[in-house]
Amino acid sequence: MLLERFRAAKRDELAALRALEARGALPAPLAGSRPSFTAALTAPGREPLAVIAEYKRASPSRGVICEDLKVEDVAAAYHAAGAAALSILTEQAHFHGSLDYLARAAAPALYAGPRPPLLRKDFLCDPLQVRATAATPAAALLLIVRLTPDVALLRGLRELAESCGLEAVVEVFDATDLRLARESGARLIQVNARDLETLCVNRQACLELIHAFPPQAGEVWIAASGLSRPEHLRAAADAGYTAALVGGALMEGGKPGAALRALLAPHVLPAPGASGQGGEACL
């Protein structure tokens, strides 16, 4: 199973963190405040919705996407092109990421004005990983229900993150995942249109889930995977999503800033209710 492969890939990382903990050498949480991830996604003026633009060098579904671009250059380009927040893939084995990318993407010199909030996207299932994230400039981290389906553990990881000044984006795929996410107290809910076992993408299922279980008070919903055209963003916004996470579609051409501008260009957005909502693909 793919999720077990992802979990296995974190064993060395967890062993290293446990060794640091045994020596009392875990890095301290980052001092000072972090940009608010929720505030960035819900700020007015993001049309058709807020975009979390992702630095993604490779993936299990696509292989190598683009390894020639530095995280600093991509982060600056995304911000200039209108990204509300940035997602930084830090998983090494399958996505060719690095925890160091968070600090590099947070360099103040990259941005004119306040820097955007950063999401650490990785396979996190242990409190030590949360504590390691708290030592970085990340504003939020990703928790995947299917990786941590125990509600008590999921709640504990979220509460630990929040105690460290981080927000937790909790990812679901279907109604069962959503029930567990809500039981854990999640407020930032990301619906992944890609099944992590088959790697198939079904945007229509992503839209149907939010129609069947509309956001509750205080929830912010994020659509993820398979969003490559302006009409995909419009369909997600019309369905009730506040934000969308887009990665491979922006990186694959080697010009992520230009790709994000094209995705957000108002003149190519269809009117509300236009087609383009559905579609399945194994990418």
Image (cartoon, rainbow, N blue to C red):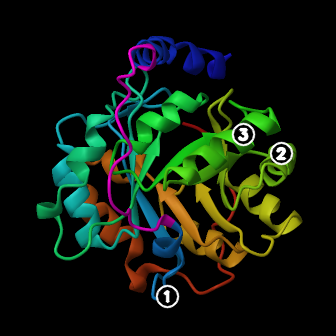
Amino acid marked by disc 2: Leu
Neighbor class of circle 3 (other Cα within 10 Å; few <14, some 14-19, many 20+) is: many
Neighbor class of circle 1 (other Cα within 10 Å; few <14, some 14-19, many 20+) is: few
Alpha carbons under labels 2 and 3: distance apart: 9 Å
Number of the label disc, if any, that sits on residue 180: 2
- In front: 253, or 43? 43
Q: Are marks 2 and 3 in contact (CB under 8 Å)?
A: yes
Q: Which residue is mark 3?
A: 154
For marks 2 and 3 on the same chain, the one whose residue lies earlier in the sequence: 3
- Please determine whether, in this image, residue 155 is positioned above or below residue 242: above
Alpha carbons under labels 2 and 1: distance apart: 30 Å
Alpha carbons under labels 1 and 3: distance apart: 31 Å
Neighbor class of circle 2 (other Cα within 10 Å; few <14, some 14-19, many 20+) is: many
Percent x, y for residue 187?
A: 69, 62
- Please determine whether, in this image, residue 59 is positioned above or below residue 102: above
- In front: 263, or 109? 109
- Please determine whether, in this image, residue 173 is positioned above or below residue 140: above
What SS does tag 2 mark?
Answer: helix
Q: Image quadrant for the C terminus?
A: top right
Q: Image quadrant for the N terminus?
A: top right
Amino acid marked by disc 3: Leu
Side of 15 relative to 75 (left or right): right
Give, as a single range, the part of the protein colored magenta: 21-37
- Main SS class of the magenta portion in the image: loop
Q: Which residue is mark 1?
A: 44
Number of the label disc, if any, that sits on residue 132: none
